[in-house]
Image (cartoon, rainbow, N blue to C red):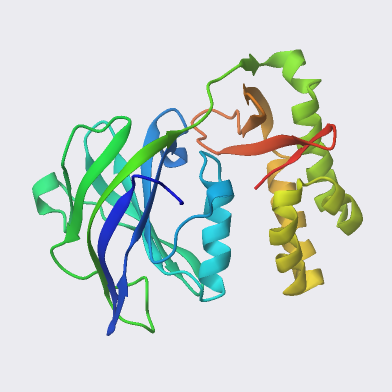
């Protein structure tokens, strides 16, 4: 059974629609909005469970959730909690447009309409309840305001331990970085066959869905993305067992532009993963 020992109950109200939240998935991951140096606790509350094979600390579950949401097969909300302070102030709502980001900036915790009350200290498990003191508008322009109220308990999945950090010439010559440059070069050239060959099997489905929506437009988007990435410099390659994170950054003073691309071994080669 998915998430054995996990439990969730509650509702996501979107306009006049009420969605029963019966499943939970929790993972501790890098907080890219904080530069990637901090971690965030990400909790998915949904009406369907995350498949067993995707219940791990990678982005695979997130791409699955977005695809299912766009197809109208999955509803739910992602709650992002700061593990250091136990506060919740952002996340994503699953819609037919995919994952719609929401956030709230307040001057003090007591004035936030997003409330998280942990039932125990955050650690190997997360348990507690989330609720909103008032609905939030802006995410669902056509469907109306939304709000969530739920209780949950879940084991917290964590990323694999770092097994190596490469910098300088070692990073430049690494197969992990070469996998990233192969993908970016293929995108820049709009070479669809080369793009397909540079991604891992788990990413192929998302790529094909993107292409099916309009090949020319998809290639333009990928080329623009690659052009931006290729202006950035390689800073380091972090290896976590059977996956690696290739970090690119703008090295100009005061710039905070940064990208992290994940690669995994596939068929004896490293390839870009979702």
Q: Nearer the viewer, residue 52 or 37?
A: 52
Q: Residue furthest front?
A: 1
Q: Position of residue 213 (x, y in %)?
A: 72, 74
Q: Position of residue 186 (x, y in %)?
A: 85, 49
Q: How many marks?
A: 0
Q: Position of residue 32 (x, y in %)?
A: 47, 39
89 above or below 168? below
**Residue 270 image-quadrant placement:** top right
Q: Residue furthest left?
A: 110
Q: Residue at x 54, y 27 (%)?
A: 160
Q: Residue at x 83, y 52 (%)?
A: 195
Q: Is residue 108 visible?
A: no
- Is 241 positioned to the left or the right of 272 in the image? left
Q: Position of residue 3 (x, y in %)?
A: 42, 47
- Is 198 positioned to the left or the right of 234 in the image? right
**Residue 125 image-quadrant placement:** top left
**Residue 21 image-quadrant placement:** bottom left
Q: Residue at x 67, y 28 (%)?
A: 242
Q: Residue at x 46, y 51 (%)?
A: 2
Q: Nearer the viewer, residue 39 or 106?
A: 39
- Is 234 positioned to the left or the right of 102 in the image? right
Q: Is residue 183 visible?
A: yes
52 above or below 179? below
């Amino acid at each position: 059974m998915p998430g054995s020992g996990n439990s969730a109950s509650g509702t996501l109200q979107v306009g006049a629609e009420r969605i029963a939240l019966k499943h939970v998935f929790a993972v501790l991951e890098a907080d890219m909005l904080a530069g990637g140096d901090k971690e965030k606790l990400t909790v998915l509350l949904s009406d369907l469970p995350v498949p067993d094979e995707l219940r791990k600390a990678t982005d695979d579950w997130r791409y699955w959730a977005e695809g299912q949401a766009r197809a109208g097969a999955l509803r739910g909300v992602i709650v992002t909690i700061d593990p250091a302070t136990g506060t919740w102030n952002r996340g994503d709502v699953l819609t037919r447009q995919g994952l719609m980001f929401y956030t709230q900036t307040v001057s003090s915790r007591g004035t936030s309409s997003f409330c998280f009350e942990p039932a125990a200290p955050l650690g190997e498990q997360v348990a507690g309840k989330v609720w909103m003191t008032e609905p939030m508008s802006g995410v669902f322009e056509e469907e109306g305001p939304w709000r969530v109220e739920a209780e949950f308990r879940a084991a917290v999945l964590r990323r694999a331990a770092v097994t190596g950090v490469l910098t300088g010439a070692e990073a430049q010559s690494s197969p992990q970085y070469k996998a990233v440059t192969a993908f970016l070069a293929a995108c820049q050239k709009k070479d669809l066959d080369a793009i397909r060959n540079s991604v891992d099997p788990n990413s192929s489905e998302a790529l094909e869905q993107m292409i099916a929506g309009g090949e020319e437009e998809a290639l333009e988007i990928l080329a623009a993305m690659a052009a931006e990435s290729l202006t950035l410099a390689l800073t380091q390659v972090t290896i976590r067992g059977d996956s690696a994170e290739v970090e690119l950054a703008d090295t100009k003073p005061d710039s905070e532009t940064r990208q992290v691309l994940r690669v995994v071994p596939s068929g004896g080669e490293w390839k870009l993963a979702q």
